[in-house]
Amino acid sequence: MSPNSCGNERLALLGGKKAIPNAFAKYNPIGKEELAAAQQVIQSGVLSQFIGAWHEDFYGGPKVREFEKAAANYFGVKHAVTVNSWTSGLVAAVGAIGIEPGDEVITTPWTMSATATAILQWNGIPVFADIDPETYNLDPKSIEKNITPFTRAIMVADIFGQSADMDEIMKLAKRHNLKVISDTAQAPGALYKGRFAGTCADVGGYSLNYHKHIHTGEGGILVTNDDKIAERLQLIRNHAEVVVGDKGVSDISNMVGHNFRLGEIECAIGIEQLKKLGGLVESRQALAATLSEGLQGLRGLTTPVVRSDRTHVYYVYPMQLDVGQIGVTRDRLCDALNAEGVAVSRRYQNIHLLPVYQRKIAFGSKGFPWTSDICRRPVSYAKGICPVAEDLNDNSYMGLGLCIYDLSFEDVQMIAQAFQKVWAQIESLK
């Protein structure tokens, strides 16, 4: 179907033929290299070599150490610490920076829920700031408005694949003596002023969940240039309370350990995946550029904005609709696109509106930590505290999960043609 024929095609939603007749292949970056690496580990019989005590194997087996060394070299940091999930990584990071019960941590509502629940795990108090309407990342001006005498850290999320404005955020942190955690789960390989996203904060890192750019099934990589934070991450990962005495650790705050250890098979796979990251990112960027070109000129549709000092790796391809200009609701447009075979999401999420925050019930049934003495002021999670994020979610945001599919340039062109078809028949949707 050519763009010129779009106006003659009846929409699939109204009984016409689908623009994309077949489902796209699922994204799968795993190849023969990963198979061989995993097989080698299985044949060795050493599937894990961690010991939860101060011992030479406290840091794990050979593949864990090899993967961590490779990741540190790749991302240009002193330390990389693997964990069994990125949620575990966030929990470890919050504990490692020394959060005390009742400390406030400013974060974004426009992220996966674990970003904020990692704060709650240490009895910290999440405080939600608003986002930039173009990048969907935390707005430094909103961060500053939410800083109080009880603020101790900022949790940034590099959402959808583009870094937040880290220079401004780090300046704020320095001025107010705050630590910064960079949740770069969705943006491995993205650049911010020539540095990898996730490496500009006190501690950051990446998800290795199965639908990320590279993956080990589940897992995560923490990165930092701070020796003390790195040690604390390693301790929290592996039963800290048992280890600190023999290791001679004097600061035992938050040294309540976990089993956040990543196995040898996953790390062997991760070593091979890391080698592919650059190529996979470049491929995703090329596909996104082709899609943006194919969507140019569609009335009321804004394609991703990429700031000139950073790159985007397109975990999600985010768009915005001006429904007033189009004259059709977002739901109606999304229904039409989905019927054509384009799986678009019509909202992301505002996690401050989840029941845990609306009812302020986390640990037990009595409202802890908000109703306890450790919470030093009333913190609002009412709708209206993040107007940009809320309006995007309620009215104008629309996204394509490029992470889900193994797309070719021909697939992307079909997606663009499906959009063109819907826009050409927009009057029939009213």
Image: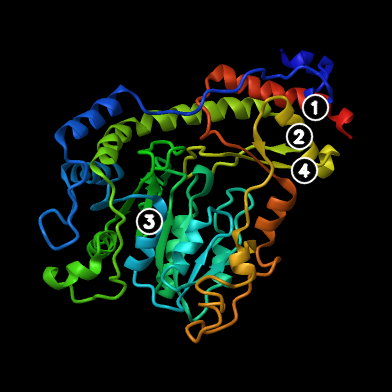
| Label pair 4/2, CB-CB below 8 angstroms | no
Q: Indicate left or right for 11 with 86 as reference.
A: right
Distance Cα–Cα, label 3 vs label 1: 43 Å
Which amino acid type is marked by label 1?
Leu
Which amino acid type is marked by label 3?
Ser
| Label pair 3/2, CB-CB below 8 angstroms | no
Q: Indicate left or right for 160 with 247 as reference.
A: right
Distance Cα–Cα, label 4 vs label 1: 21 Å
| Label pair 2/1, CB-CB below 8 angstroms | yes
For the point 53% across and 29% down, the residue is 405
Distance Cα–Cα, label 3 vs label 2: 36 Å
Badge 4 is on which residue? Answer: 322
Badge 2 is on which residue? Answer: 335
| Label pair 4/3, CB-CB below 8 angstroms | no
Residue sticking out furthest to the bottom: 373
Badge 1 is on which residue? Answer: 13
Badge 3 is on which residue? Answer: 88
For the point 38% across and 50% down, the residue is 85
Local secondary structure at mark 4: loop
- Viewer-side residue, 78 vs 109: 109
Quarter holding the N terminus is top right
Which amino acid type is marked by label 4?
Asp
- Residue 110: x and y, percent? 58, 55
